[in-house]
Image (cartoon, helix red, strand yellow):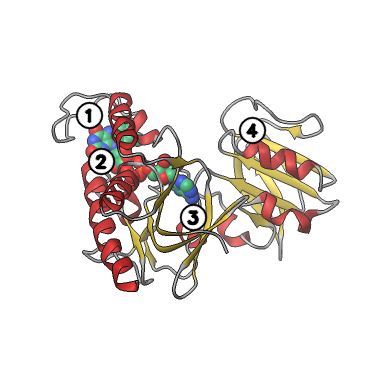
Amino acid sequence: MSDRYDLIVIGSGPAGISAAINGVIRNKKVKVFGSRNLSEKVQKAPRVDNYLGFHGITGNELKDVFSQHLEKMQVEITEEKVDAVYALGKYFAITTKDNSYEATSVIVASGVSNKKSLEGENEYLGKGVGYCATCDAPIYKNKKVAIVGYDVHAEEEANFMLDVASEVVYIPLYGQPEKIKDGVNVVLGRPLRIEGNEKAERLVLHNDHIDADGIFILKDSVELDQLVPGVQIEDNHFVVNRKMETNIEGLYAAGDCTGKPYQYLKAAGEGQVAALNAVSFIDNMQ
Ligand SMILES: Cc1cc2nc3c(=O)[nH]c(=O)nc-3n(C[C@H](O)[C@H](O)[C@H](O)COP(=O)(O)OP(=O)(O)OC[C@H]3O[C@@H](n4cnc5c(N)ncnc54)[C@H](O)[C@@H]3O)c2cc1C
């Protein structure tokens, strides 16, 4: 059995790190998943005028202030993308590509993705379309696979797939790939839709099409209902109450992933509310 955390936080934006800091202050064993750079949406803000106490700060400066705060409180970020959270009654199992973790309570603070689904993506999900190439690799042994990579991390999955599939076509959506292996067929183009019949059969690009047995769409985020099976979602956001509780006991959500307005202070405030309620939940479980 793996070591069980009191609290696992998914996401390192303002919501996630505010949740983590409040969990640590309450002496809980906390783990945070996300990125060392915290959040692209923090880093890329040209100028922020509505973060209390930091008038005129740039996103990058705000990121540095957040990082220093985390360092002072010895909160580390684990750079693994969480693929799924399973509610198993008395605890949660949290899986990443290579590892599995356990926690008494979970806060999802994964933000919102601006990357819209492709036409046909939802229709064929599980029928030739997937979000985790390494998880589904055995299904595509000696078959042809197309992989759409939204960021550089997808390259690792394409390289791995090369060992299994008969042919791997990789479509990077962020410019030239950096570490793709020889043997992977790189096609530059903009995907438009996925076509098929009973199963997905073809990825249509604006200037081309690729026939494939499996099509993987590797975004930096996971669709919320894929991330937490059984969770209640409305308009692509988690449904939460004022305690930031979801419909799953012990599972909380905070930040942009719970709905508009999409703002730093709303996210940080929700992270705090979620953490303090998670702490009460954890204490009651002991
Ligand atoms: C250019 C720009 C300027 C902005 N300016 C302002 C402004 O001036 N004022 C303001 O209030 N707001 C502003 N915003 C909005 C603000 O950025 C968001 O409201 C805020 O970042 C939301 O915080 P969050 O923690 O909910 O999510 P995010 O900041 O989006 O963080 C989510 C984090 O979770 C990680 N994550 C997601 N899924 C997983 C997973 N499965 N496993 C592990 N990690 C995962 C992501 O990589 C990311 O690091 C701006 C946004 C942009 C894009």
Q: Position of residue 14 (x, y in %)?
A: 30, 42
Q: Position of residue 214 (x, y in %)?
A: 73, 53
Give the residue at x 74% y 53%. 137
Relative to the observer, which residue lies in front, 262 or 62? 62
**The CB of the residue at mark 2 lies under 8 Å from ligand 1:** yes
Number of numbered discs visible in the structure rendering = 4
**The CB of the residue at mark 1 lies under 8 Å from ligand 1:** yes
Q: Which residue is mark 2?
A: 264
Relative to the observer, which residue lies in front, 57 or 36? 36
Numbered label attached to residue 70: none
**The CB of the residue at mark 4 lies under 8 Å from ligand 1:** no
What separation in Å lies between label 2 and label 1 (alpha carbons)?
10 Å
Numbered label attached to residue 223: 3
On the rendered structure, is 117 left or right of 252? right
What separation in Å lies between label 1 and label 3 (alpha carbons)?
28 Å
Q: Helix, strand, or loop for circle 2?
A: helix
What separation in Å lies between label 3 and label 2 (alpha carbons)?
21 Å
Dot 2 and dot 1 residues touching (CB under 8 Å): yes
Give the residue at x 27% y 58%. 274
Q: Position of residue 161 (x, y in %)?
A: 75, 45
Assign the C terminus to one quadrant of the image: bottom left
- The earlier-in-sequence mark between 3 and 2 is 3
Q: Which residue is mark 1?
A: 48
